[in-house]
Image (tube, helix red, strand yellow):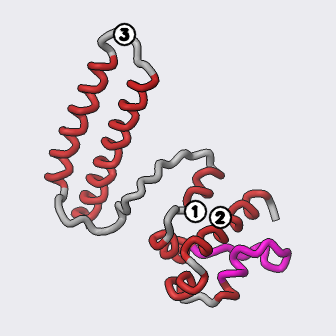
Amino acid sequence: MNAAGNYLKKHAEALVKDVGLEAACALTGKSKATLGRYYSTSDEHADRFMPVDAVAQLEAASSYPHVTSALAELRGITISYDVTKKNTPEKEGGVNHDVIALSQRFAMLMGEYTVSMEDGIITINEAKRLLRETLELQQVLMSMKMHLEDEAT
């Protein structure tokens, strides 16, 4: 098995252990033996990997998206993990709510930028504040994208 396969199996195991073996079986409808084969590094199970639907079910119940982050790392992609579960239905909002939040967040970002540039230098603390605002803006854009996709279907 190649290094990438081994890496994915280790993260699949971490995912199952995060959720708990019994709970993982109940969520996916797979047996303990089947789940074990998905993360076994023995030669006879080297070509078996957890199906993507099972990964999605387990990651929805886990404390961290272990397999998703491993896949991103293997491709050299950086992802930002937000503890709030954005894939759960939101009680308020829609596209109109997102447009308002987007304009407010953008104004806050520009305010931080203006303050940061008063002396012509962005310090490390100012950069951290700008980064936080940028991440908040990104989350609003993701929410807006999800709402627009819902309306388009």
Specify few, some or many for label 2: CA neighbours under 10 Å numbering under 14, 14-19, or 20 or more.
many
Instruction: Indicate whether residue 42 is drawn in magenta.
Output: yes
Q: Earlier in the sequence, mark 2 or mark 1?
A: 2
Residue beneath label 1, please?
66
Q: Residue 148, image x and y in percent?
A: 25, 57
Point out the residue furthest to the right here: 43
The residue to which callout 3 is attached is: 120
Front one among 82 and 55 = 82
- Give the class, few, some or many, for how many residues have Cα within 10 Å of label 1's Cα (few <14, many ≥20): many
> How far from the left and from the top, in percent, is residue 54?
54, 77
Please tell me whether residue 108 is drawn above or below residue 7 in the rendered image.
above
Label placed on residue 21: none
Q: Which residues are magenta?
A: 35-51
Residue pictured at 50% horizontal, 49% vertical: 79
Discs 2, 1 touching: Cβ within 8 Å: yes
- For the residues labelled 2 and 1, the Cα–Cα distance comes to 6 Å
Q: Amino acid at mark 3?
A: Gly
Q: CA distance from mark 3 to mark 2?
A: 44 Å
Q: Residue 40 lies in magenta, yes or no?
A: yes
Residue type (three-letter) at the residue carrying disc 2: His
Q: Residue furthest top?
A: 119
Q: For this rendering, which residue is in front, 49 or 114?
A: 114
Spot occupied by residue 107 in the image (x, y as percentages of width and height): 21, 32
Q: Secondary structure at mark 3?
A: loop
Cα separation, mark 3 vs mark 1, equals: 41 Å
Amino acid type shown at disc 1: His
Sequence-wise first label, 3 or 2: 2
